Every structure is written in structure tokens, then in C-alpha cells.
């Protein structure tokens, strides 16, 4: 009986496998209810916004699944102008977003990193107001960098970092990355980030060719063992010009299976980890129009509306069918508000919406 499993205090791998294997409609409802109760009891039911600025699509990595991989010569590479970013950041602060995410491919040149460092400092300075006495909250997602770089960007004012493990199964990780991108280095990065004092986010793709339900259950246990603060997960979606695109099954049933599996992963992560922040990702919406709302209904509490300027959106094409490419920033805000309200939730306006788990693991 799923009821008994969902109400356990400690979750073993078998329990998580059972949760991820749910198929019956009543069981789905019970799962959703349990996820929402866990959400309310541990982090409250507000949804926090982080405006997502895709700062650059240059990348020195060659991940077999990603449209921005360096071997893909079909990408119009860009780096956003500092002025444009500061303008978007100001918009973000004025519209009550509270936080933004600066994301880019993995670029390690000094010229690039010092530019980012400067921008972080300026965003902090320019967005201080009565509502945001310390300026916007800044999350960065710039791939694997040295510990010194992480430290430097933390001093500049970033306080959260996203770095997905993609899969915690080392064999699977090896299958989807070139040899020089090592699993151990990613773990080392996650540990450095925690040591420095970032709120650390990780996550996985769901539906990678060759990935089992057992792998996904292990992923949740990995999140727990690593004691991370934030989780972002999304379905794996074909991206043309990548080695993994040929493994994608275009079959509608398979698409539905991966979508449902992603929702079950969100709920199971909420139930097992309880007080972390969980994002309902854009990739969910790429599969089904109401995917992001559903993510909220299964226990997510963070949404990252796209703030990348219109001209560059089409060039940050990580996977095929990425939504919101034609919308402008105001459209995205209106759309997100409606989506959140339709899930019966409220936005945590002008708040960082930091991970409760972070404070618990550090100060209690
Ligand atoms: N499908 C889904 N997600 C992808 N990402 C990269 N390529 C794909 C894809 N084809 C995700 C990775 C990465 C994040 C920025 O985008 O998980 O960490």
C-alpha cells in the first residue's frame, strides 16, 4: 500500500522505488497530497521567483546531451552586454522577484570571470531598496570552476550556486560525458561550494537513455547524502546536433512516461528531503504546456521565469522545443503569475526565498 510507504519516517531505496513506480490514479493523488502537506509543514507554500538571465552560451564542455556543447558549430555564440544585464536586474528588483540567476556555459577565462565578478557587485549595489535592503539575491550557475573562483564570486555577492550532477550513477555519468569531464570533479566542486558557504543546488535529468528507476531512487539518496539545499530536475529532451539525440524515443507514451516520472521525482524528493527548495523547471513545460504548474502541485516551490533579452533567447537552445522563446519579459511575468495562482499558491514577492535546509544545517 502506497499510503503506508508515504507515511514512513525513514525512506529506504525500495520505498523510493515504490513511489516512483506509482501508476494508479488514486496513488497519484495520495502522492500529491503528501508532497503538498510536507511542503506546507516544512517550507510553507509560497512560490519564490528567480529571474533567469542566460548570460552566455559559450561553453568549453562537450556534454553529449546539450545543445550548447562546444562541438555544436550550429550555435550563434553570444555574451550579453553588462548594461543589458544591469537593466534586466533592475527590472527584476522593481517587479518584486527578489532574486535572479546568472547562468552560462562553462567558461574559465580570467577575462570572463572578472567580468562576471564585476557584474555581481554592480547588481548588488544597484538593486538596494527599502524592499530589498541587501539588493537582489544572486544565484550563479557557471559550471565547474576552481575553489578560488567560487570563493571570489561569493565575496562579490553571489550566495547560491547551481551545479547539477546530471546522474549520480557514475557509469551513466560517464556515458553522457566525454572522458575529460570527470564525475569526481563535479563532486569536488559541490563540496567546495558547500565549504565556502553557498546554498548549493544540484539535480539530475530524468529519462536519460539507459537510466533506471533504481538510478533515480539512488539520485534522491545522493541529494540527501550530499546534504544539498536546492534541487532542480527536468526531463531529458532531445537536442539536435548532439550525440544523444538519436536515442530519443519520439513516441507519445514515452514522452508521457518521462513527464510523469519527473513529477514523481519532485514529489518523492519533497517527501524524503522535506525542507529543501525545489524548482519547477522550464523543461517540464517543454513537454506539456502546464508542466510547470504541475511541478508546483507535486511539491516544488521555486520558479525561474526567463529574463534573457529577447534577441538572445533563441541562441540558448539547450534542448529542442524550449518554451518562452517568443515571449518578452513582461509576458513571462504575467504568464508565471497566472500559472502560480492557478495552482492555488501565492508568490513570495521581494523575498530571497532562501533554502530553509541551509539554515538548519548551518545554524541548528
Ligand atoms: N534535455 C534536458 N535538459 C538538458 N540540459 C542540458 N541538455 C539537456 C537536454 N537535452 C540541462 C542539464 C544542465 C542544465 C543547464 O540543462 O541538466 O545542467
Image (cartoon, rainbow, N blue to C red):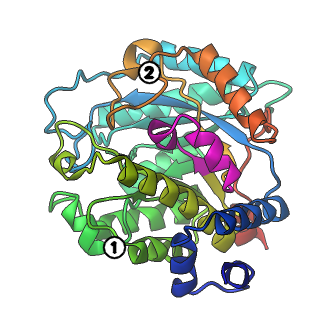
User: For numbered disc 1, what is the local secondary structure?
Assistant: loop
User: For numbered disc 2, what is the local secondary structure?
Assistant: loop
Quadrant in which the N terminus is drawn? bottom right
Q: Position of residue 359 (x, y in %)?
A: 74, 63
- Left or right, 280 with reference to 210: right
Q: Where on the picture, by quarter, is residue 291?
A: top right
Quadrant in which the C terminus is drawn? bottom right
- Left or right, 211 with reference to 284: left
The stretch of residues the image draws in magenta is: 279-299
In this view of the protein, which residue sits in the foreground, 203 or 235?
235
Would you place residue 170 above or below residue 8 in this image?
above
Would you place residue 173 above or below residue 144 in this image?
below
Residue 325 badge: 2
Q: Position of residue 76 (x, y in %)?
A: 23, 21
Asked if ligand 1 lies within 8 A of label 1, the reply is no
Would you place residue 84 above or below residue 301 in this image?
above
Q: Is residue 126 visible?
A: no
Give the total number of marks visible in the rendering: 2
Amino acid at each position: 500500500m502506497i499510503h503506508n510507504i508515504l507515511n514512513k519516517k525513514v525512506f529506504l531505496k525500495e520505498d523510493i522505488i515504490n513511489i516512483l513506480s506509482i501508476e494508479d490514479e488514486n496513488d497519484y493523488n495520495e502522492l500529491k497530497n503528501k508532497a503538498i502537506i510536507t511542503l506546507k509543514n516544512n517550507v510553507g507554500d509560497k512560490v519564490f521567483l528567480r529571474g533567469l538571465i542566460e548570460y552566455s552560451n559559450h561553453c568549453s564542455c562537450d556534454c553529449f546531451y546539450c545543445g550548447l556543447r562546444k562541438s555544436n558549430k550550429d550555435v550563434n555564440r553570444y555574451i550579453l552586454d553588462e548594461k543589458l544585464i544591469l537593466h534586466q536586474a533592475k527590472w527584476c528588483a522593481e517587479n518584486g522577484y527578489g532574486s535572479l540567476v546568472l547562468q552560462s556555459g562553462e567558461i574559465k577565462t580570467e577575462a570572463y570571470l572578472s567580468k562576471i565578478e564585476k557584474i555581481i557587485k554592480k547588481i548588488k549595489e544597484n538593486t538596494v531598496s527599502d524592499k530589498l535592503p541587501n539588493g537582489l539575491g544572486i544565484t550563479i550557475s557557471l559550471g565547474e570552476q576552481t575553489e578560488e573562483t567560487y570563493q571570489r564570486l561569493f565575496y562579490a555577492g553571489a550566495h547560491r550556486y547551481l551545479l547539477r550532477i546530471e546522474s549520480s550513477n557514475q557509469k551513466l555519468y560517464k556515458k553522457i560525458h566525454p572522458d575529460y569531464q570527470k564525475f569526481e570533479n563535479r563532486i569536488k566542486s559541490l563540496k567546495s561550494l558547500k565549504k565556502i558557504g553557498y546554498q548549493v543546488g544540484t539535480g539530475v535529468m530524468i529519462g536519460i537513455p539507459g537510466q533506471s528507476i533504481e538510478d533515480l531512487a539512488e539520485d534522491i539518496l545522493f541529494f540527501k547524502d550530499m546534504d544539498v539545499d536546492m534541487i532542480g530536475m527536468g526531463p531529458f529532451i532531445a537536442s539536435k546536433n548532439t550525440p544523444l539525440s538519436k536515442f530519443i524515443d519520439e513516441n507519445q507514451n514515452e514522452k508521457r512516461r518521462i513527464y510523469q516520472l519527473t513529477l514523481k521525482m519532485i514529489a518523492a524528493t519533497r517527501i524524503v528531503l522535506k525542507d529543501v527548495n525545489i524548482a519547477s523547471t522550464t523543461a517540464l513545460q517543454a513537454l506539456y504546456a502546464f508542466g510547470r504548474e504541475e511541478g508546483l502541485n507535486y511539491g516544488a516551490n521555486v520558479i525561474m521565469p526567463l529574463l534573457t533579452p529577447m534577441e538572445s533567447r533563441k541562441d540558448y537552445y539547450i534542448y529542442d522545443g524550449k518554451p518562452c522563446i517568443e515571449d518578452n519579459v513582461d509576458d513571462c511575468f504575467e504568464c508565471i503569475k497566472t500559472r502560480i495562482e492557478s495552482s492555488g499558491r501565492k508568490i513570495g514577492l521581494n523575498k530571497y526565498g532562501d533554502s530553509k535546509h541551509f539554515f538548519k544545517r548551518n545554524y541548528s
